[in-house]
Image: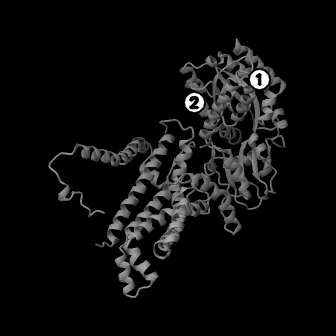
Amino acid sequence: MRPLVITLTAALTAVVLAGCGGSGGGGGGNGLSGLIEADGSSTVGPFTSAAAQRFKQEQSGVNVTVGISGTGGGFERFCRGETDLSDASRPIKDEERAICEKNGIAYSEFLVANDGIAVVANKQNDWVDCLTVAQLKRIWEPGSKVKSWQDVDPSFPDEQLKLFGPGTDSGTFDFFTDKIVGEEGASRTDYSATENDNVTVRGVSGEKGGLGYFGLSYFEDNRSQLKDLKVNGGGGCVAPTRETVQAGTYTPLSRPLFIYAKTSSFKRPEVEAFIRFIIDHEVEIADAARFVPLTAAQLKLAKQELRQAAG
Amino acid sequence: MASRSAVAPPALQSSRIRWGELVIKGMLALCALVSVATTVGILIALLQPAIDFFREISVVDFLTGSEWAPLFEPGSFGVRPLVYGTLAVTFVAIAVAVPFGLGSAIYLSEYAHRRTRKVLKPTLEILAGIPTVVFGYFALVFVTPWLRDIGIQVDIFNALAAGLVMGVMLIPTVASLSEDAMQAVPDALRHGAYALGGNRVHVATRVVVPAALSGIVASFVLAISRAIGETMIVLIAAGQQPTLTLDPRRTVETMTAFIAATGNGDVPRGSIEYKTIFAVGLTLFVATYAMNIVATRLVRRFREVYE
């Protein structure tokens, strides 16, 4: 439900804004105009939207629509040539790359921010602060028989475990199963699987024995309703914060986020200007969209990529 | 209804062909055809992908399997959890809608003063005009916490709250249709019953309700069909976790919620995941259609015909 609604809302907003911009009379920037279509990861979507909002203040003639049909769904449209930009919470897969190549879609990859997956529990949960990757794996692996918190660790109470998480379309699902279970897409199936992270927030905050996972940005939005769990990836318990994600110590659940730009679109001045804007204002946008900004080294790399793409 | 003849009385029959009449007749027939054609169209659209689906997954596995996880690798395709989820919600909804709806109808038709009825009936029908998405959130943020407050241990997403709210939503459907049917019962029957010494309760329950039974049962059938087909309320309040249980306190996923959630996702066209949508849709169609047939039979058998 939500991706469609958000896409429509974004599109409508863009149209409304376009109307306002028109009456303003090209007051902004050097008068670029056009429509940039972005789709893809629901995690990266808010980042692109935040960037588009700020870009709009400089270039009132350019409208950016941001869909959130998932990283896989986004690439599917991108490789059919339907979108200019594809938001992705993981690098493009070989199969997707092959489809793009077959359809003659060339592109550049831009690292735009860092993200972590937060593992969350109910506020009333007072028995657990940290889970090891092995425990998370026991809970989430296919065919898992873990029904109660006591099955996770005998010292935990016999409280029913109620699981919530993203559906199979989500880049977050791919990433989590890859890092925790050890095989991308391998997961138990008897949990509330939804592409709508708000359902997970509502579910975990409504069940004392609730456990769920989603992007750190969603957790920061709902910090008051949920308890974040530390994750022990072998080097001790680490909380999901922007510092630990940036430092790369929140392992294995931190990841880079990308925006892919179609080469033929990138040749349009407004698209190039938008990407340049994102990289120049990366820290500000990432902060606004509640992501973890790039480190200085990552930013240097992104600027290099931009120079190459601009040829 | 069935006894009414389509032949015009002799005075209106004419040897002259009336073209205007023919055009109107044709247009009216077209109107009737639209709904029939739509139904047939839906069936055809459902059938092809559903048949493709059953080429890959046997009907037996589909109907008897106890796990529904078609989007996972490897997928499992037992539809029973979805059917159970639908049944649990429907059962709760009907347990609310039928007694309250019929009670309202009897009150409105047999007890209420005409002026009271004039105010009450439209008020009741407002309930039918509330968007289902509003009912859904009402169930989730109001009814579920309330159930927990009174000591019923429900999951945060559960069939009970969704069913209760859906039942309330269906009260006007049952009440309004049943009341119409009871109003259509000839007054002579009521007078006769009173003359025999019956009191109001007897007249209402032993004379009017049996006489209006076909209309009343039709309202139940419509309510059940709508409960089975209702999507938004269950999507919001009943959950998205297929569970093989009839316990309404648990999180379930109904057939309609699966179709809505999956149809809006990114499953690639033509994949087996995509075809599951149609297989479930066909199951839903067959279930409601079979129920309608059974209901028609029942009505025919128990109907009391007067005049």
Marker count (numbered): 2
- Give the residue number, with chain letter if any, for mark 1: A279
- Mark 2 falls on what kind of element? helix
Q: Using the rendered image of the protein, determine whether residue A69 is visible from the camera's viewpoint.
A: no
On the rendered structure, is A38 left or right of B278?
right
- Residue B258 % position (x, y): 54, 49
Q: Is residue B294 above or below residue A49?
A: below
The residue sitting at 67% across, 49% down in the picture is A199
Q: Nearer the viewer, residue B10 or B54?
A: B10
- Mark 1 falls on what kind of element? helix
Label 1 to label 2: alpha-carbon separation: 25 Å
Q: Residues within 10 Å of mark 2 (few under 14, many from 20)?
A: many
- Residue B26 % position (x, y): 28, 45
- Give the residue number, with chain letter if any, for mark 2: A76
Q: Residues within 10 Å of mark 1 (few under 14, many from 20)?
A: many
Instruction: Please identify the quadrant where the N terminus of chain B is shown.
Output: bottom left
On the rendered structure, is B299 left or right of A76?
left
**Which kind of residue does numbered mark 2 sit on?**
Glu
Q: Is residue B300 above or below residue B40?
A: below
